Image (cartoon, helix red, strand yellow):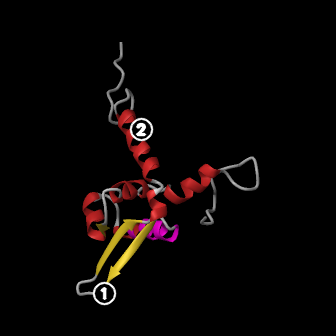
C-alpha cells in the first residue's frame, strides 16, 4: 500500500481497515473509469485519452502507473516505431470486475435519484 500523507482516518486495529486498502488501489478520480473500460479488453494510451478527454496526459500516466504498481493492470510495451503500449487487466485486476460493475450499477441508480447532479431536482411548492 502506498504511503499516503493523510490516510483515510482511524481504524479500530493496527492492521488497517480493508476498505482503506481497497480505496488505496482503486481510489482516485480516474482509476475506476480506467478499470471499467479495461473490462471490455485491452486499451492503448490514446484510446484512454479519447474515452476520458478531461483527464490530463500527466494524470492519466500517473493513474495507470499506480494501477500497474499495484498489480491490477499489465502494461505491454511493443518496441516498434512508433512505440505501442497496451494496458490490460491482470488476473488479480479481474477480481475487481464485480466491484467495478456494482459501482456502475449504483451510479446508474444514483444519477436518476431526485436531487443528484443528473437527476431531477425535487419540485418546490
Disc 1: which residue = 79
What's the CA distance linking mark 2 and mark 1?
Answer: 41 Å
Residue extending furthest right? 13
* Camera-side residue of 122 and 83: 83
Q: Earlier in the sequence, mark 2 or mark 1?
A: 1
The quarter holding residue 113 reads top left
Q: Which image quarter holds the C terminus?
A: top left
Residue 115's tag is: none
Is residue 82 depicted above or below 98 in this figure?
A: below
Residue 122 horizontal side relative to residue 80, left or right: right
Q: Main secondary structure of the magenta part?
A: helix
Q: Quadrant of the N terminus?
A: bottom right
Please determine whether, in this image, residue 26 is positioned above or below residue 118: below
Q: Is residue 6 magenta?
A: no
- Residue 52: x and y in percent read 30, 58
Please, is residue 10 above or below residue 105 in the view?
below
Residue positioned 56% across, 58% down in the render:
24
**Which residue is situated farthest in the front direction here?**
91
Q: x%, y% of residue 82?
A: 23, 84
Please tell me which residue lies in front, 39 or 56. 39
- Would residue 22 be found to the left or right of residue 72 on screen? right
Residues shaded magenta: 60-70
Name the residue: 43% across, 44% down.
103
Secondary structure type for disc 2? helix
Which residue bears the numbered disc 2? 106
Amino acid at each position: 500500500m502506498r504511503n499516503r500523507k493523510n490516510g483515510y482516518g482511524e481504524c479500530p486495529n493496527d492492521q488497517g481497515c480493508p476498505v482503506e486498502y481497497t480505496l488505496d488501489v482503486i481510489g482516485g478520480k480516474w482509476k475506476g473509469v480506467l478499470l471499467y473500460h479495461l473490462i471490455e479488453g485491452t486499451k492503448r494510451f490514446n484510446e484512454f485519452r479519447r474515452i476520458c478527454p478531461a483527464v490530463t496526459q500527466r494524470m492519466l500516466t500517473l493513474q495507470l502507473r499506480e494501477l500497474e504498481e499495484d498489480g491490477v493492470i499489465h502494461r505491454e510495451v511493443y518496441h516498434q516505431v512508433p512505440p505501442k503500449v497496451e494496458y490490460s487487466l491482470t488476473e488479480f485486476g479481474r477480481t475487481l470486475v464485480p466491484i467495478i460493475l456494482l459501482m456502475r450499477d449504483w451510479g446508474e441508480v444514483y444519477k436518476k435519484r431526485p436531487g443528484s447532479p443528473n437527476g431531477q431536482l425535487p419540485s418546490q411548492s
